[in-house]
Amino acid sequence: MAELSKDQLLEMYYDIVLIRHFEERCKELFAQRKIGGVYLHLYSGQEATGVGAIRALRPSDHVITAYRDHGIALARGVDPKRVMAEMFGKATGVSGGKGGSMHLADRSRNFWGGYAIVAGHLPLAAGIALESRYNNKDDVVLCFLGDGATNNGYFHESLNLSAVWDLPVVWLIENNLYGMGTSTEIASGQPILVKRAIAYGMKEGPRVNGMDVIDVYKASVEAVDYARKNGPILMECLTYRYEGHGVSDRIYQTRVEEMKKYKEMDPIIVLRNHLCDQYGDIGAELDNLDKRAVMTVNEAVQFAEESPDPIAEDLVRNVYA
Ligand SMILES: Cc1ncc(C[n+]2csc(CCOP(=O)(O)OP(=O)(O)O)c2C)c(N)n1
Ligand SMILES: [Mg+2]
C-alpha cells in the first residue's frame, strides 16, 4: 500500500481536531439547553476510528452508524453547519430538524444515519449492501457498531445474511470497552469480538489500535478492498470514549485511572507526534489547522443560532403515513 502523503495526514489531522472541537462545543451548548434532548452521545476519544476508516472509502460507498454519530457525519464530509443546525432542531439541519443528535443523515454523502436502537441499523446496512450486489454495483457499506451491539439479535441476523449472500459490508466494531456502564469483559462470552466472524463463516478482519488513525486507515483499506471483491468482513477497533455514555452520565470512579492511560494515547497526540517525527517542525501548520477547526465550529454555531425553526407543516413532510 502506498504511504500516506503529508497532505493526506494533515487532512486527517484536521478532521480529528474538527470533531474534537465540535464535540466540546456541543457539550457546552447541551448544558446551556441550546441543544435539547435527554441524551447527548459524544465521540471524543474515538475520532481516529471514524476518520481513519471513512478515509478508506470512495464517495459512492455507503456509511451507517448508531447514535454516536456526530463524528462519523463530519468525517464523511457532511457540512458542519447543517450538523450543528440539526443538533439545535432547526429547519436547516441535515435531517430538517426532526432527527436531532442521534439521527443525522445526508443522502448526498451516502451517509444513512444515525440510529438510536442498538444494532437496529445492522439490517439496514445489509439491505444497502444487497442493493449494491443485486444491481451489480461495486459499492461497499461501512457499518460502524458498538461492542454492546454485538450482543443484540440483529447482529446475528445481519452478519449471517451478509455471509449467506456475500454482501459487500465492512462490519466495524468500535470497541470502546463499554456498553453504557457495562464492560465488554463482563457482557461478552468472547471478548475478542472480531472472533465472532468465525461463527458466520465470515472473514475475520484486523483488530487494531483505534486511537491511531494511520493504523485504522491501513486496516480499513484492506478490509474495504476485501469486501468489494469478496463479501463481508468483520473488523474491530480498540478505542475509548472520554465522556460518560451520554454527557449527563457519570464516569465511574474505576474509570479514572483507565482514562488517564487512554488520554496518553489520544488520537490527536499520536498523530501530532507522528507528523513531528516525520516532518520536523510542523507545529505552526498544525496550530493553524486547530484554529481553522475552531473557526468552522464557531461558524456552525452561528448558523444554527440564526436558522429558523421548522414550521408546523414540516411535521408531516417527508414522513410515511
Ligand atoms: C435495543 C436497545 N436496547 C437497549 C438500548 C439502550 N442503550 C442505548 S446505548 C446502549 C449501549 C450500547 O453500547 P455500545 O453498542 O457499546 O455503543 P457505545 O455507546 O459504547 O458507543 C444501550 C444498552 C437501546 N437504545 N436499544
Ligand atoms: Mg461501547
Image: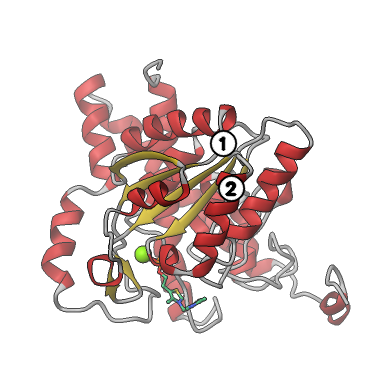
Q: Work out whether residue 224 or residue 103 is closer to the camera in this orientation and state it.
A: 224
Q: In this picture, is 218 found above or below 205?
A: above
Q: Is residue 310 left or right of residue 241?
A: right
Q: Is residue 240 left or right of residue 74?
A: left
Q: Residue 95's x, y, as percent?
A: 71, 64
Q: Is residue 161 left or right of residue 242?
A: right
For the question of whether residue 280 can be seen, the reply is no
Which residue is depicted at the point 16% across and 50% down?
A: 264
Which residue is depicted at the point 41% across and 67% down?
A: 151
Q: Residue 247's x, y, as percent?
A: 38, 75
Q: Work out whether residue 63 or residue 48 is closer to the camera in this orientation and state it.
A: 63
Badge 2: how crowded within 10 Å, few (<14), some, or many (20+)? Answer: many
Which of disc 1 and disc 2 is earlier in sequence? 2
SS for dot 1: loop
Q: Quadrant of residue 37?
A: bottom right
Q: Amino acid at mark 2?
A: Ser
The residue lying furthest to the left in this view is: 257
Determine which residue is flagged by label 1: 231
Q: Amino acid at mark 1?
A: Gly
Q: How is the image coloured?
A: secondary structure
In the image, which disc is placed on residue 162? 2
Which residue is depicted at the point 34% across and 81% down?
A: 249
Q: Residue 315's x, y, as percent?
A: 82, 79
SS for dot 2: helix
Q: Quadrant of ligand 1?
A: bottom left
Which residue is depicted at the point 32% across and 56% down?
A: 45
For the question of whether residue 255 can be seen, the reply is yes
Q: CA distance from mark 2 to mark 1?
A: 8 Å
Badge 1: how crowded within 10 Å, few (<14), some, or many (20+)? Answer: many
Q: Could you tell me if the residues under marks 2 and 1 are in contact, i.e. CB atoms within 8 Å?
A: yes
The residue lying furthest to the top in this view is: 2
Q: Residue 211's x, y, as percent?
A: 29, 46
